[in-house]
Image (cartoon, rainbow, N blue to C red):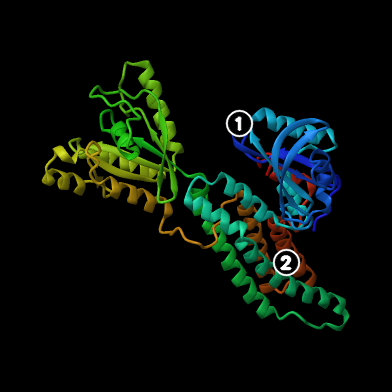
Amino acid sequence: MHQLSGWDDTIVALATPPGVGAIGVIRVSGQQALSIVSSLFPSKDLATLPTHTVHVGLLQVGNKVLDEVVVTLFKSPRSYTGEDVVEISCHGSPFVQRQVVDAIVQLGARLARPGEFTQRAFLKGKLDLTQAEAVADLIAAGTQAAQRAALQGLRGGFSAELKQLREQLIQFSSLLELELDFSQEDVTFADRTQLKDLLTRLESATDALLASFKLGNVIKNGVSVAIVGKPNAGKSTLLNSLLNENRAIVSEIAGTTRDTIEEVLNIEGVLFRLIDTAGLRANTVDQIEQVGIERSYEKMRAADLVLYLFDVADPAEEVKQWAMDAQEQGLRFLLVGNKIDVASADSIRARSAQLPVSPLFIAAKDKTNLDALKKSMLQEVLSGHVLHENIVITNERHFQALLQVAMALADTKKGIEEGLASDLVALEIRRCLQYLGEITGEITNEEQLDFIFSKFCIGK
């Protein structure tokens, strides 16, 4: 359990989204939660009632009735925050909700800061820091894959992995510290070969976690996909077909798309942010179109994946040159040949043979081969990874700390190989423990916690 000053007051916040709805849930947590709500709920004395019980009655200030509500009790320590918690389910009128919250504040509570309920849960030892951060990830999850990754963190999968690494290091660190106490006798308690083997295993485990961050970033943040190509290659038609709606204007007139259009597509639990761009051409007298083309290049360079769409009737040399330039720039891309419905199979094969990268051929208008395109997009961004229940790092803070762990492990291993003194080896191991502890919150400070929880929503 973490002890920080200034956490003995009572807080209140609306726990459901603001606005009109069937009900609104107001959460109160802290030492005075029971007494404050009891004074507004005269039909029962909440302090005398058992935990995890539900009660119906009138909420009122003096003789003024605010609402008929359902009150749910969670007494310390059997609550989300580890404190006394009362949840008031009132009718979903914003006016009623404001009146209830104001009445609770008038009786001594204060409005909760963003994420403060979860922060209190962490401070009371109900969650470690990685689990607390997983709460925010679960709330923000927009796909099944993001939900699975957040639930894995919330259930403590990542924490358990780190705990195992940390416990093994602590064991050897203790033996090294013991050697320092007997430095005059020149005795050895920590077997250097075993320690080196342990460090090798820990390096492998850390490297695996670091490698998962690429996939985790895709799961959490989605993939930006720029659809680029010459005017009238069918980019807007492709966007509309992928989305199954007429989102972009389609016309035979070249240069119809003047600005970028962004939409979201979910492919097997991964979010793809599709960006339809203005057609790429070297010469145009239209200043507005030229601005659109410049933005297309910006989007292309910033995208996680580029779909270069070309008309199968276009000269293969143009497509070949674009692909070679993209390879030089380090772009991740797929070549997509469009309008196969109006081209012969022989001409398609001939063009394909001239290109440095095998293209995928589609007919965007008729939605031919779009499933194959989606599959290729998914394979490209997952790079052979499979979306399953394994631990995946999705948090940038965790990733940066693990990088430091990996460096400290490498330095420790090098020190052992070079015969470094026990006190210096112990110092390197303490570095590893420091960074591992920062991830789970075993080693932290109030300023760091405030920054992390400030990104949560109010009421959570």
Front one among 412 and 100: 100
| Helix, strand or loop under label 2 | helix
Q: Is residue 19 left or right of residue 325?
A: right
**Residue visible at 33% across and 34% down in the picture:** 245
Q: Is residue 229 visible?
A: no
Question: What is the spatial separation of the Cα atoms under label 2 and label 1, in whole angstroms?
Answer: 52 Å
Three-letter residue code for mark 2: Ile
The quadrant of the rendering that contains the C terminus is top right
**Residue visible at 58% across and 46% down in the picture:** 139
Ranked by sequence position, the earlier of labels 2 and 1 is 1
| Helix, strand or loop under label 1 | loop
Residue 157: quarter of image: bottom right
Residue bearing the label numbered 2 = 429
Mark 1 neighbour class, 10 Å CA radius: few under 14, some 14 to 19, many 20 or more: few
**Closer to viewer: mark 2 or mark 1:** 1
- Give coordinates of residue 84: x percent, y percent: 79, 51
Three-letter residue code for mark 1: Gly
- Give coordinates of residue 337: x percent, y percent: 24, 41
**Residue visible at 60% across and 50% down in the picture:** 395
Front one among 295 and 134: 134
Front one among 424 and 349: 349
Residue 189: quarter of image: bottom right
- Give coordinates of residue 418: x percent, y percent: 68, 72
Image mark for residue 167 = none
Front one among 451 and 145: 145
Residue 295: quarter of image: top left
Q: Is residue 345 visible?
A: yes
Residue bearing the label numbered 1 = 19
- Give coordinates of residue 271: x percent, y percent: 45, 45
The quadrant of the rendering that contains the N terminus is bottom right
